[in-house]
Image: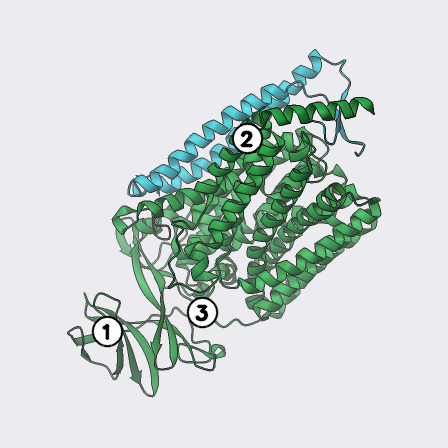
Chain colours: A green, B cyan
Amino acid sequence: MNYTVSPWAITIFCAFVLAVLAISYHFARVTKSAAGFFAAGGNIHWSVNGVAFAGDYLSAASFLGICGMIAFSGFDGFLYSIGYLAGWVVAMFVVAEPVKRLGKYTFTDALNAKFNSKGIQLAAAISTLMVSIFYLIPQMVGAGSLVTPLLGLPHELGVIMVGTLVIIIVATAGMASTTYVQFLKGGMLLIFSLILVFLVLSRGVTTSPDQGGDVPFRQFATVRVGLWDGQQLALADSGYKVVRVFPEKAGALVFAKLERGGEESFWKLNEKEMLLEETQNITVKPDGSKLYNGQPKDKGRFYQVGHMSRITKNGQEAQKTGTTDFFSFIRAVKEGTVVRWLKHPAVRDGDDKVTIYYQAPIAGREVLKPGVKFKVDSARGATTANKLDFISLMIALFLGTAALPHVLIRYYTVPDPASARKSTIVAIAAIGLFYILTLYMGLGAMVNGVLDLTNDNMSAPLLAKSFGVTVFAIISALAFATVLGTVSGLIIAASGAVAHDLMDKFFKVKMDEHRKVRWGKLAAVGVGIIAMVLGILFKGMNVSYLVGWAFAVAASANLPTIAMILFWEKTTARGVLASILVGLGSALGMILLSQETFNEVYKIPHIKSLIPFNNPAIISVPLSFLTLVVVSLLTQRQEAARAARINVQEGSK
Amino acid sequence: MHGPSSQWAKDHAASIKRILGLWMVTLYTIVYAGFVVINVVSPSFMAVDVGSFNVAIAYGFLLILFAIFLAAIYNHVCTHAEEVMRELRPEDEPEVMEEGHA
C-alpha cells in the first residue's frame, strides 16, 4: 500500500528519539567503569529492572510480529505469545537467582564459574554472539518495516537509522541508559497497548469497516460467469472482456485476466457460485518496476483489507456489533465469518510476473483455533512431520527465553539474587498482560480493514492509524523505541561477549577498566554494522518467525548447560563444552538447511530440503542434553584430576 | 583472577528455593505440554466453546495467568524462607563470591 507521511507523526517520533538520546547522554556522563557499562553498576531497583525486562523482551517480534501473525492467521499467532510467556517460568524458577549468584557481567561468567575452563569461555562467547545476531535480524527487519509508513523512507534507510541510533546509545552509556530506555518504553508500550485495545473494543465489529470514517470501505466486485468448461471462460454480463485464463491446470486455482475501458485486472474463479471475484495484484515488469492493481504505487490503488462478511448479534445477523468488551468481541469473531486474504505465488503473464492476493472467507471458529498457519490438523492434511515441527517450535519458545543473552545480562543490573527473582515477577506480570492484549490487537487489525497485504509486520501500527494519526504516531514511535531498546540490549550482550569473555578472559589481553569499556564500545559498533547488513538482507520475512530461530539456537546451545550445571553434580567442563558446540552446531545447521530457509532466504523453493523440520529444537535440544550427559560421564576421571590440580594451585598461592 | 565480584548474605534458603523452583517448573511444564499436545492431537477440541471463548483461548489465557500466579507464590515462599533462615542463623558472615569458584 502507499503510505502518506504525517508531519505530526514525524514530530512525535522525533520527540521520542530525542528523549532516548537525552537519557543516553545523561548516563554517558556517569558511566566510566566496566561494571557501569556492562551491568549498570549493579544497582538498578528490582521494580525498574522488571519493567525494563518487559521492555527488553517485548521486542519487534512481540509487538509487530505477533500482532501481524494474529491479524493474518488468527489464533496461531497467539501461540507465540503463549510460548514466549511460558519461557519466563523457566527463567524464574530455574535460572534467575543462580545466574545472578554465579556471574558478574555475562552468561559465560555464570557458566564458567565452577570450571574456569578456556574452552567453555570461547564456546559460550561464540554462542552468545550467534544468538544475539540471530535475534538482531528480526529487530532490524522490524525497524525497516516501521520506518516506511512512518517517515516515508525506504526499508534500508530505516535499518541504517536504527543501527546508527543504537550504536550511539550503547557506545555512549551502555547498560545504564539501555535499562532506563527500556523501563520507559516497556511501561509506555503497556499503557498504549491497553488504550489501543480499549479503542478496538469500543469500536466493535462491522461488516464494512471504514477506519472510523477516514477510509471508505472497499467492496470488491464480482462478475457472473456464463460458461466454464475447464478451458473456455465466458462472462454472463458486464462490459468486461476475458483476456486470458490461467493457470489452465486441473485442480489448481483458476484466475482470469479481464479488460474493461483499457484497464486490465485479475479475478479468481469461484466455481461453486459461478462467479469471478476481484483480486488485488502486484505486477513486476521485466525492468523491475512494480504495478499495484495495474497502477504505480503512489496512485493508492492497492487497498487495505480485512473485514467480517457476516456478524451475528443475539443470534440474529447484523451489520455491526456496537461497543464490545473482552468477551463479546471474541464471541463476535467466533460466531461470524472472517474474510482473509491469501497470496498466490507469482504467475507468468507474458514477460510480467503477477502475484495475486485473493479473498478467502473462513468461519470465525476456525480462525480462533490452531491450524490456519501451523499444520497441526490432520483433517487439513497435516503430516506427522508437520506436527513435530510445531512441537519443536513450542519447545524452543519454552526453553529459549531463559537462555537469551540479553535477558541473562539483565540479572547483573540488580544488587542481589533476591532482587533478580523479584524483577522476574514484575517482568512476568507485565509481559503476561501485554501478551493477552496481543490477541485483541491482532484480531482488531484482522477485522478493521487496516491490513497491508505486502507487510504483515505493520498490522498493529496500521490498526492504531485507524484511530487517528496521533495514536498511530505514538504507537509507531513506541514500536521504533521497542526495536531500539531490544537491539541495544542485544548489542551490549554481544559486546560483553567480545570485550569481557573473549578479550579479557580468553585471550588474557591486559586491560584496565577504561580499555575494557573502549573494547566494549568498539565491539558494539562492529555488531551494530553486522546487524544493519542482515536487517537489509532479510527484508520481508515475518519477524516473529525469525525470532523463533533465535530461540531455538539459545534453547539448544545455552539452556542445557545452565540447567545441568545447576542440577546435576556430575557435569564436567568437557561435557559443558561439547553440549554448547553440539547444540549450537545442530540448531544452526538444521536452520540453514531447512525448507523455510531454502524458500525465503536462498530463494530456491524448487529444491527440497532433506531436513523434515523448519524448527530444530525437538532434535537439537535433546541432542545437546544427551551430549552433555554422555561426555560428562566419560570424563569423570579427568574432571577429578583437573579439580585436584586446581586445588593444589589454589593451595600454593 | 579477578577480585571478589559480589558480596551477599549467605543464602541458607537456597536448597528450599531450588526444590520449590523445580516442582513449580515441573508443574507448569505439564500444563504447558498438555496445551501443546491437544493442539496437535485434537485441534477440533480447541474449538469447543468455553463461554464466549473457546478451549484454545481459555487455555492460552490460563497458561499466562497461571505463570503469574505461580511466580507470585514462589516469591512469597522464597522471601519468607529467607527471612526465617536469616532469623535462625543471624551470626553468619556474608558470602563472598569469587569468579571461577562457585
Q: Quadrant of residue A232?
A: bottom left
What kind of residue is marked 2?
A: Ala
Residue A231 vertical placement versus B31 (above, below): below
Judging by the rendered image, the residue that carries numbered circle 3 is A215
**Spatial separation of the CA atoms under disc 1 and disc 3:** 37 Å
- Chain hosting mark 3: A
What is the x, y in percent for residue A444?
43, 55
Instruction: Classify residue A158 as left or right of residue A2.
Output: right
Which chain does tag 2 point to?
B
Question: Which quadrant of the view contains residue A94?
Answer: top right
Residue wearing tag 2: B71
In x, y percent, where is residue A234? Answer: 19, 79
| Residue A336 in sight | yes
Q: Chain of mark 1?
A: A
Viewer-side label of 2, 1: 1
| Residue A24 appears in the figure | no
Q: Label 3 is placed on what type of residue? A: Val
Count the marks. Answer: 3
To which residue does mark 1 refer?
A248
The quadrant of the rendering that contains the C terminus of chain A is top right
A381 left or right of A25?
Answer: left
- Which residue is more in the foreground, A300 or A31? A31
From the top left corner, tell me how far across and down residue A641 is, in percent: 67, 24
Discs 2 and 1 lie in a common subunit = no
